[in-house]
Image: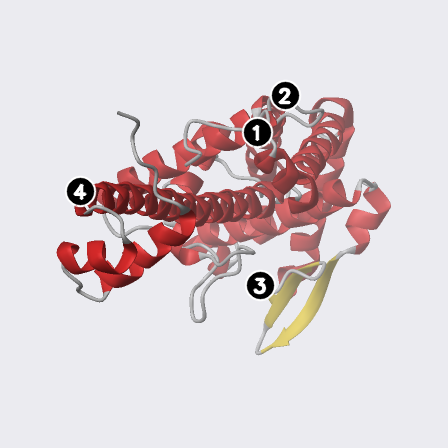
Amino acid sequence: MRRREVSVNELAKIVSLRQNNFSWLKIEKETGVPRRIAQRAYRDYERTQAGGEFKAARETVATEELRNHLNSLKKLAFVLVRDLFDIPWPSRDPQSAKKFLKFLLERDIASEYGVYGLPSRGQSRYLSTTDSYSAEVCYRQNELLLKSLQEHTKHTDHKLNLSDWENAYDTCRSHQVKLLEELDQILPIVLNLHPELKRAEVMASKEKKITGQMADGLTYLLWQSILAGKVELEELVSKVKVLGGGEGRAELEFGNLASRVIVPEDVGAQAKEVCIGVITNLLARRKELIDPLLKNVEKLRRANDDLAKILNPLTLVPDILHSKCDLCPC
């Protein structure tokens, strides 16, 4: 026997009556559809509706998760561009590029920053986790997001590859250390040429502190000139000035550096001569100490510019939406 089919109008009436708590016997009388057939049609209808609702729910969740994934990648991209863009200040014990990147990824970037990477109100630029466990959790999460960025860009014309940045960063750091080591060797030698400065009471009690301050001031002048791409003896010498500090003391000024070196007034001129002597000796080895830094600073800037272009939201967002990574929800 041929199976009786339920028309669209009959099904609509069955659904309406059943949802109003009519019994199947009454539904049969009202519609003329045998109750077993009506029951079967109603069950089929419910399964179809449940499947559609489940699919719609899945699509809603997937859309929201994709939005969250996109925002997480945008936050990380913003922080990478902002924090890797800075040229590192000279240090006698610098971090390697990998260590600096690890420090960056150990931060809770997801909760610290909004969609555009802006810190929440009252938060500083560098917020770190408070314990090693939290740092490790953040690192693992951010490392996965970094790999996700690399996956989303690997088939594009602007593939994210941090190796160029790492090489430029580490090379710059090694040349900085070499410059500082040479400065630390030359400064005491030049200082010994001025016994009147060595014999000064302040120098006798605080020699290490004052020479350290002089080294910091000279480092500041040299590094500012290197960043500006112009390291000239005359210009550097002109920025070392002796100012009267009153009360029998003089202040040694290094360009626009806020902190100054305080020395006895009668040896202020000799202190300046020491600084000029150090600068002169360093620039005498320009090809070995200065030129490599000028070259590597430009190389690091180019690497930073490349990262900024790759991670620019105008290019990054389309790359993410037109590709898939292991973390993508759909």
Q: Is residue 210 visible?
A: yes
Dot 3 falls on a residue whose secondary structure is: loop
- Residue 65, image quadrant: top left
28 relative to 274 in the view: left or right: left
Circles 3 and 1, Cβ within 8 Å, touching? The answer is: no
- Mark 2 vs 3, N-terminal side: 2
Task: Identify the mark at residue 259; answer none if there is no mark.
Answer: 3
For marks 3 and 1, give the one nearer the viewer: 1
Q: Which is more N-terminal, label 1 or label 3?
A: 3
> Of residues 284 and 319, which is closer to you in this image?
319
* Residue to which mark 1 is pinned: 323
Q: How many angstroms separate mark 3 from mark 4 (CA)? A: 93 Å
Q: Which of marks 3 and 4 is in front?
A: 4
Q: Can residue 93 be seen here? A: no
> Which residue is denoted by mark 2 in the rendering?
155
Answer few, some or many: residues within 10 Å of disc 4's Cα (few below 14, many 20 plus, some between 14 and 19).
few
Q: Which residue is drawn at 78% across and 45% down?
A: 228
Labels 4, 1: front one = 4
What amino acid type should be assigned to the residue bearing mark 4?
Answer: Arg
Residue 172 sits above or below residue 199 on the image: above
Residue at left 21%, top 54%?
28
